[in-house]
């Protein structure tokens, strides 16, 4: 029987339930319009005698909003599918040391992505990077209307807002590489459920 770990974030789900739900959500993300077209961002800054000009190419806004409905479940520590939690489930149940090492290496990359991979923006003495920039957009713009974050996005100069947006998109891209790699590791590292092909059984 699959183990249950009694944490509020797991919401009563067993480890096996969490892994299979993670697989399911990864497939749901791949089926979105953004998952089908691919996520991209291109931010150009040009400086000449006329001054500074910027250009930001990014995904369609409606496609991003739709994608975030599922994707944010992988980023929030309060969710059972929080990526750090899924790494922990895999590490507990993998019996092969090589796969455990893969999880360790993936977690190091994930930690770097969370911190912004060495890139940050400082506004009025407050540093924003990685997951914090993601939170600004998700909670201040898309879903929860955090007043402070909304005010921040409304008041920063256009070029800074573009930098924020580029970092937000880059965070999603980096996270999705990790999510897809982990999904493949889960599918190759555990026994397939004969009752539910495409999903796994834990030992």
Image (spheres, rainbow, N blue to C red):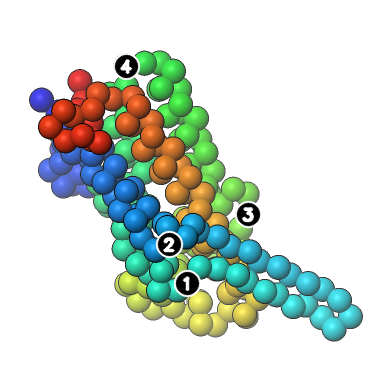
Dot 1 corresponds to which residue? 60
Using the image, determine if residue 90 lies above or below residue 141: above
Residue at the image point whose x is 44% and y is 37% from the top: 181
SS of the residue under disc 4? loop
Q: How far across and how far down the image is residue 3, in percent?
A: 15, 29
Number of numbered discs: 4
Q: Tell whether label 1 touches label 2 (CB within 8 Å).
A: yes
Q: Give the mark, 3 or 4, whose residue is nearer the N terminus.
A: 4
Q: Give the mark, 3 or 2, whose residue is nearer the N terminus.
A: 2
Dot 4 corresponds to which residue? 95
Q: Is 146 in front, or is 92? A: 92
Q: Tell whether label 4 touches label 3 (CB within 8 Å).
A: no
Q: CA distance from mark 3 to mark 2?
A: 25 Å
Which disc, if any, is residue 34? Answer: 2
- Between circles 3 and 2, the one closer to the viewer is 2
Q: Give the mark, 3 or 1, whose residue is nearer the N terminus.
A: 1
Q: CA distance from mark 3 to mark 4?
A: 36 Å
- Between circles 2 and 4, the one closer to the viewer is 2
SS of the residue under disc 1? loop
Q: Give the mark, 4 or 1, whose residue is nearer the N terminus.
A: 1
Locate the N terminus and report the quarter of the image it occupies: top left
Dot 3 corresponds to which residue? 119
């Amino acid at each position: 029987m699959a183990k249950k770990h009694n944490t509020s974030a797991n919401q009563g789900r067993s480890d096996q339930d969490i892994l299979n739900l993670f697989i399911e959500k990864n497939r749901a993300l791949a089926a979105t319009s953004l998952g089908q077209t691919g996520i991209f961002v291109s931010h150009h800054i040009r400086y000449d005698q006329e001054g500074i000009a910027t250009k930001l190419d990014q995904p369609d806004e409606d496609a991003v909003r739709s994608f975030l409905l599922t994707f944010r479940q992988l980023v929030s520590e309060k969710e059972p599918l929080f990526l750090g939690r899924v790494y922990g489930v895999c590490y507990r149940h993998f019996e092969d040391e090589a796969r455990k090492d893969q999880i360790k290496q993936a977690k190091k990359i994930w930690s770097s992505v969370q911190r912004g991979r060495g890139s940050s923006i400082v506004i009025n003495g407050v540093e924003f990077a990685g997951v914090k920039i993601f939170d600004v957009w998700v909670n201040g713009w898309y879903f929860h209307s955090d007043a402070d974050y909304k005010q921040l996005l409304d008041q920063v100069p256009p070029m800074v807002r573009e930098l924020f947006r580029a970092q937000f998109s880059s965070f999603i891209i980096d996270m999705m590489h990790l999510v897809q790699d982990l999904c493949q590791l889960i599918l190759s590292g555990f026994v397939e459920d004969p009752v539910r092909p495409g999903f796994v059984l834990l030992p």
